[in-house]
Amino acid sequence: MGSLATNFFAFLFFFPIGTRRLLCAFSLHLKNPCVYRSKIWYMSEPRWKNIDLYILLIALPIASFSEIFFFLTFSGHSTYRFAFFQQAAVISLFWVLVVLVILRENIDPFLMHEGLVYVFAGIAFLIEYSLMGLGITGLGGRVYELLGGLTLVCAAACFYLSFRPTAFFAEVALSSGLIFKGTWVLQAGLSLYSDAFSLMGCRKISMSPAQTTTDVQCDLEDDRLRGVALINLLFVLHLIGILTMSFSLFGALSWNRNLRCGEGAGPSMADVESESMLTRPLPESELE
């Protein structure tokens, strides 16, 4: 993620997926908590409505080829040059994940266990973590350090869901982690690669061959320390905002069923209990 454009497109990838997962997970859990089970992808009916999935199927290879093009043509700092290749590799992994989801949902679910898809997703997040922010130090390194922590949360949630798909807290952690990654990667792009939103007393990371270090350039040490403190504060504010959004969404779905995701349109607890009462055999005293 070496430019404002790539960070913005990463935001467009993570934020909508995380928001939709959180909405559908809340909907399913509120409808019937006893039979809740996480899904690798919350499909919509009819199937042509899954436009987000098929957009990713087309857009991710284009993004990967664009990164490879920059890798082949960029003649600047070697760290940036190889960063483009690393980004292309990570994008390709997530594209393979989308292909696995489509194969499982549209061909035969029994040919591919959903736990394997979750394991592959966890591995993709771990590879992304290992390549994230390589060569960037100082203030920029702190931004990617926090982003790496969010990536590890997503990876851990995927591995946990691979053998316990009924874990509602793991699904919430994965969905919230995707939302948080989306907002924070956008914040990283604005703070590190934009002059308009750069930190006070500091300049954006330059891709000029004359620059020997890959870090935010600050005029004074106090500016750098203030920048680190501001980054930590922004991270906390993002966290508070996402927690507030999650609680508000859960409350809104609890109050108004019409807002719930289509995947949640199953039998409610009241329906299940009434059905069990109807099918339950009568006691002998009542039969007499």
Image (tube, rainbow, N blue to C red):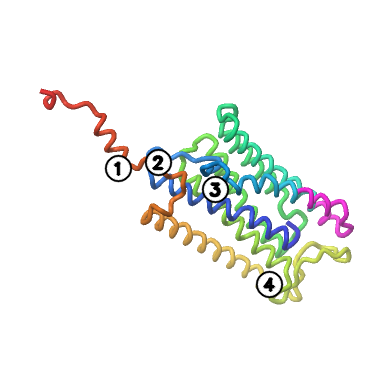
Look at the numbered disc 1 and give the secondary structure of its residue: helix
Residue 141 tag number:
none
Specify start and end residues of the magenta stretch as a single range.
64-83
Seen from the viewer's position, the closer of residues 220 and 200 is: 200
For marks 2 and 4 on the same chain, the one whose residue lies earlier in the sequence? 4
Q: CA distance from mark 3 to mark 2?
A: 23 Å
Question: Neighbour class for label 2 at 10 Å: few (<14), some, many (≥20)?
Answer: few
Q: Are marks 3 and 2 in contact (CB under 8 Å)?
A: no
Residue carrying label 3 = 174
- Give x and y (percent) for residue 74: 87, 56
At label 3, the amino acid type is Leu
**Element at label 4:** loop
Residue topped by disc 4: 197
Q: Which residue, given by chain and number where applicable, does mark 2 sit on?
A: 266
Main SS of the magenta segment?
Answer: helix
In the image, what residue type sits under mark 4? Phe
- Foreground residue among 17 and 117: 17
Residue 114: quadrant of the picture: top right
Give the alpha-carbon distance from disc 3 to disc 1, as whole Å.
29 Å
Q: Earlier in the sequence, mark 1 or mark 4?
A: 4
Q: Amino acid at mark 2?
A: Gly
